[in-house]
Amino acid sequence: MHKPFPEDPSIDKELSGAMVSSDLAGNVSHLKKLFTDCSDVVFQPVQLHHKLAATVMYIRGMINMELLDGYVLTPLKKIDSDPPETISKICEQITISDHKELQTIGDIVNDVLDGRAVLIMDKLAGALSLGLTSFEKRSIEEPLAEAVVRGPREGFIESLGVNTSLIRRRLKTPALKFVSFTVGRYSKTELNVAYIKGIAKPEVVDQVMNRISQIDMDGVMESGLIEELLEGDNYSPFSQLQITERPDVAASCLLEGRVIIITDNTPMVLIAPTTFWSMLQSPEDYYQRFIIGTLIRWLRYLFLLVAMLAPAVYVAVLTFHQEMVPTTLLLRVAKSREEIPFPALLEALIMEVTFEALREAGVRLPRQVGSAVSIVGALVIGQAAIQAGLVSAPMVMVVAITGISSFMMPQYPTSIALRILRFPIMILSGILGLFGLILAMLFIISHLCILRSFGVPYLAPLSPIYPNALKDVLIRAPRSKMRWRPAFYTRKRNLIRQSGKPDEQQ
């Protein structure tokens, strides 16, 4: 299944649908009319054997000129037999295996824009497309957005072909399917939907493909544009697709029964469906021994609550529930707030907004100075604010701990969601106390209970409960005990073979 190129509104329909004639001058004239003012598109006239006129069309910088000269043009100039009468006869003379015959002007335009070279010859109806694509690309290196403690240090790059090969190297089975789509009227960006037949749910695969088929936009520059169009609820702060730039993570998700979406020109791969708990899991949870993985996972869950609730609890307790604080600690906090002119809620909002600004500034600055500026800025501004009597020292500590806690989330979208939710929870806590905090948490949990990712409940396997899958949520059970794939991902109760024994012996 391959979705055809989207219709480009800049190309004349009648001209693009015209057949390639045997008149070389007419064909070149049509193509030059389409590519007016395109200085990077080259029309190179060549004289083949028997004085056969031809034109090679390509985009400068996107093909391998040495292969074009050595394996196409040179053999054609040395033809000893009679002039070829068909495109098939031309194909017998060249040593490029990746070639195909084109019949319309529109086909030529699409192949040239795709980075191929096209040979158009006089007295021959049709054109020959040559797979000589060669352009600069980034080498495979360690992923920047997902730090690797233990595991493969390879990351996806911006080349779709390289990314699919990285996955194929890990899953050497014909059951791994790659279905190609093309999205974008102007960009014509290629996407690959990958899944393992027999493991992934057919209804989920069909749903992903149907949503991609309905996308109609001018251009796709990054997979984030696709992600927003595939999500079921755009107004939710929680991402309904997981992202990764690690091939081992993508391969593991395919083995679980999930579907991945690989977009050309970006190293970020989308994974669907996803759950709230999978957004909190790290690949290192499975590469380390299960005891270490479980302890790190519990620590992550604890600081998830800290990142979302710590400022709200501090504001609520200081404003409405001072009796909950030990007397000695309350006296110290009260002493630190004696000269603070703002209520606790406004003080917390000022500090949180300032911290977010510093964090965002650290991201936007050059890498060499970004981290230093954000750390030094936080220290200097925090200390200066305390000495000026604008904020209290305990508030600075709470905000700092909250910021550090949000950095523990493996998925950046989850960290963003916590940063967004922190402010309304804080405001409700400042107005209604702990009642407001509980009200906000009930609203968030209710929202998570009704949220779906391609039909999969977002809180699965806790809501609804899948008993066999709980051993990979609350804990990370030993591999010998994790015998079944998650039932909400796969088409049926699917056994994972851990010991190499036949199914009936397990």
Image (cartoon, rainbow, N blue to C red):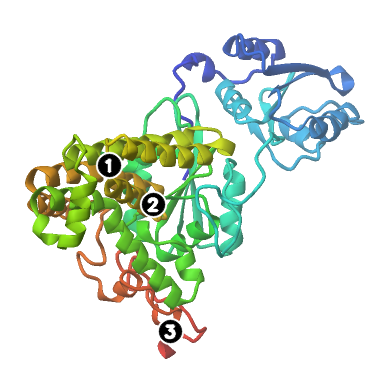
Per the image, label 1 sits on a secondary structure element best described as helix
Q: Which residue in the protein does label 1 denote? A: 420
Q: Position of residue 413 (x, y in %)?
A: 36, 46
Q: Picture quarter containing residue 423?
A: top left
**Residue 11 located left or right of residue 355:** right
Sequence order check, earlier mark of 2 and 3: 2
Q: Earlier in the sequence, mark 1 or mark 3?
A: 1
Does 219 sit above or below residue 431?
above
Q: Nearer the viewer, mark 2 or mark 3?
A: 2
Q: Nearer the viewer, mark 2 or mark 1?
A: 2
Secondary structure found at label 3: helix
Report the Cα–Cα distance between label 2 and label 1: 16 Å
Q: Amino acid at mark 3?
A: Asp
Nearest to N terminus: mark 2 or mark 1: 2
Foreground pick, 353 / 148: 353
Q: Which residue is label 2 attached to?
A: 404
- Point 23% across, 53% down: residue: 309
On the image, the x and y values in percent for residue 265 come to 55, 37
Identified by mark 2, the residue type is Ile
Say if mark 2 contacts mark 3, CB within 8 Å. no
Q: Considering depth in this image, is 397 or 506 the residue closer to the camera?
A: 397
Q: Which mark is residue 503?
A: 3
- Mark 2 in CB contact with mark 1 (< 8 angstroms): no
**Is 35 situated left or right of 200 in this image?**
right
Of badges 1 and 3, the one in the foreground is: 1
